[in-house]
């Protein structure tokens, strides 16, 4: 059984709720602009038979992003590009679990990076595209979230069962 599987087997999705947005449009965004995003799921709490996660999407749109390894002086190293749009969108994702379920930190982290990520991604994508559309930004397309899954290595017992 993989690390995330045990938590997924016990967890029942209860709620996905928008808890925060910040959206700042600073310039005209055109079809040649570059979109960068980062989805993080750092917060998790357990209590009263619930698993709660806060998923945060950070979105940045600019005409040009300089690569980190470009020629930069020390004074420029912490300077970001001129962003035409910045957004932060946060959702609370709540799962119900049995009272006696006690996941390990490793199980919670694996569950957050697989099940929670795939559950919340469509909500975050829709919120980002809706905000962008209302701001007159054409075709803000965010890529689908992917999970890097590696099946567990077969053991002698599982190889014997398949024979």
Image (cartoon, rainbow, N blue to C red):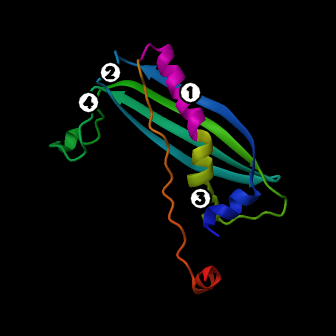
Q: Using the numbered discs, state the Cα–Cα distance from disc 2 to disc 3 in whole angstroms.
A: 36 Å
> Callout 2: helix, strand or loop?
loop
Q: Is residue 58 magenta?
A: no
Label ID, residue 31: 2
Task: Count neighbours of disc 3 (C-alpha within 10 A) and say few if under 14, some if 14 to 19, many if 20 or more.
Answer: some
Specify start and end residues of the magenta stretch as a single range: 121-137
> Callout 3: helix, strand or loop?
helix
Percent from the top left, x then y, of residue 50?
77, 51
Which residue in the structure is indicated by mark 4?
Answer: 64
Which residue in the structure is indicated by mark 3?
Answer: 109
Q: Using the numbered discs, state the Cα–Cα distance from disc 4 to disc 1 in whole angstroms.
A: 24 Å
| Left/right of residue 11 with respect to residue 138 in the rendered view | right
Label ID, residue 127: 1
Magenta highlight: main SS: helix
> Callout 1: helix, strand or loop?
helix
Q: Using the numbered discs, state the Cα–Cα distance from disc 4 to disc 3 in whole angstroms.
A: 34 Å
Q: Earlier in the sequence, mark 2 or mark 3?
A: 2
* Position of the N terminus by quadrant: bottom right
Percent from the top left, x then y, of residue 36?
38, 36
Percent from the top left, x then y, of residue 140?
43, 25
* Position of the C terminus by quadrant: bottom right
Q: Nearer the viewer, residue 157 or 142?
A: 157
């Amino acid at each position: 059984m993989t690390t995330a599987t045990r938590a997924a087997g016990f967890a029942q999705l209860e709620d996905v709720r928008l808890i925060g947005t910040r959206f700042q449009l600073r310039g005209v965004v055109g079809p040649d602009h570059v979109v960068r995003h980062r989805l993080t799921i750092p917060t998790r709490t357990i209590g009263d038979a619930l698993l709660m996660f806060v998923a945060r999407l950070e979105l940045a749109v600019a005409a040009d992003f300089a690569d980190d390894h470009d020629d930069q002086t020390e004074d420029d190293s912490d300077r970001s590009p001129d962003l035409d749009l910045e957004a932060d969108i946060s959702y609370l994702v709540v799962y119900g679990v049995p009272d006696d379920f006690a996941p390990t930190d490793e199980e919670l982290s694996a569950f957050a990076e697989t099940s929670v990520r795939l559950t919340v991604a469509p909500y975050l994508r829709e919120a980002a595209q809706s905000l962008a559309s209302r701001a007159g930004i054409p075709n803000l397309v965010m890529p689908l979230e992917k999970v890097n899954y590696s099946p567990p290595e077969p053991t002698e017992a599982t190889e014997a069962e398949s024979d």
